[in-house]
Image (cartoon, helix red, strand yellow):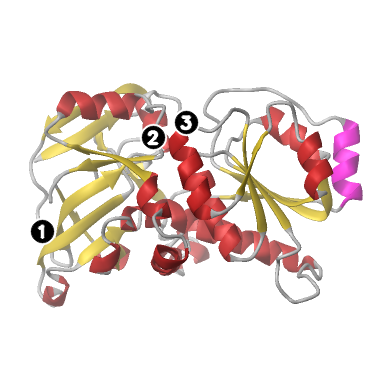
Amino acid sequence: MKAVLVSPPRPGVRIGDIPEPRLSDRGIYIRILWTGICGTDREIINGVLPIASTPPGKDEMILGHEAIGVVERASKGLEDLVGRYVILVNRRGCGRCLNCLAGRADYCETGGFVEAGIKGLDGFMAEYVVDDPRYIVEVPRELLDVAVLAQPLSDLEKSIESVLITQRRMIWSCEDGTYRCRKAIVIGTGPIGMLASMLLKSYGFRVTIVNRRDLYPHEKNMISRIGVKFYNSLNGYEELYKEIGPFDIVFDTTAKPSVIKSVLRFMNYNSILALFGFARAPERDYLDSEELTMIAAKNIALVGVVNGQKRHFETALEHIASWKSSMPGALESMITARIEIEDRDRVLKVLREKPPNEIKTLIVFSK
């Protein structure tokens, strides 16, 4: 079968022909339909993701952690799963700590978790995958065209959940019991920024999505469909602050210290800064004593947010279903390209470098 292969920490990527997997006693045999390309995939390919590693005893790893497939065969007792469309949960627990034993590998206490296509476990950019039914989530046929977005959205479901749990430290809802008086700033207009904006809007927040450049046409179309405000932060946040007042949530997808410093002084009392993702390039900057004092004096919370688990995938699919009607065309607009695996040169090119018009590119393995 064809598979996209990497050898972290070394940079590089190739499409190879490898043996098909064998069905295990408690496994299901899945034909992959398509996989999404994520910034994390490109970081692995370019050798800049420190946590990336091949499975034990292997020199190569199958890339990919966003996938839709159909169950073609199943071991005894699991035959009812044949024919089901599924997405696959990418992080698997260490099997030792309490959180992992309770199905919450997103809070692994040992660091011994594995992550498909990223850390110590083969991923899903292949024609076939054999997996454990504990790690699949069924996808309704009606959502098949955009359900691959449930994987990045699951991480955001967990992230916003963490934000709201943290903010229970006080009365944070508005006078009407909603969050409609709260202002959310999402930094970054990539797929994570777009999905985070959709999710925060669904919770009732007043959302502004931010980038330090003008929007590409496809981004303008997407933001128009979501129905949120855009702000160009090239010259800082002063004008936005004057217009809407202090920020209650800052959801950062850049992991750039300079970006965090530039927005910090415009945050509200009792606000929260959510840090999502990893830096694309090394950058050194430091909070000074005045900024640290401000964080303490304003009671600002900082929370690191990453990775959703199975129930977050399920919630993500529920939101995707609702957005199909409440934000028509928005999710479909996020899929900016579909490239068949047979088109090897084009696949390798888009894996190595993000095209300027991309929100989400899919690699099609089967139809």
Please report whichever mark, 1 or 2, sits nearer to the chain's N-terminal start.
1
Position of residue 203 measured from the top left corner of the image (x, y, whole percent): 60, 66
Q: Which residue is mark 1?
A: 23
Front position in the image: 109 or 139: 139
Contact (CB < 8 A) between labels 1 and 2? no
The residue wearing badge 2 is: 358
Residue found 54% across the figure and 45% down from its top:
193
Q: Which element type, helix, strand or loop, lies under badge 2?
A: loop
Specify which label sits upstream in the sequence, 3 or 1.
Answer: 1
Q: Which mark is residue 50?
A: 3
Percent of width and height locating residue 42: 38, 30
Q: Is residue 22 on the magenta stretch?
A: no
Q: Amino acid at mark 1?
A: Leu
In this rendering, the answer to whether 230 lies above or below 77 is above
Q: Residues within 10 Å of mark 1 (few under 14, many from 20)?
A: some
Residue 141 shown left or right of residue 246 in the figure: left
Lateral position of residue 341 relative to residue 202, left or right: left
Range covered by the magenta-colored residues: 289-298
Q: CA distance from mark 3 to mark 1?
A: 32 Å
Secondary structure character of the magenta stretch overall: helix
- Which image quadrant: the N terminus? top left
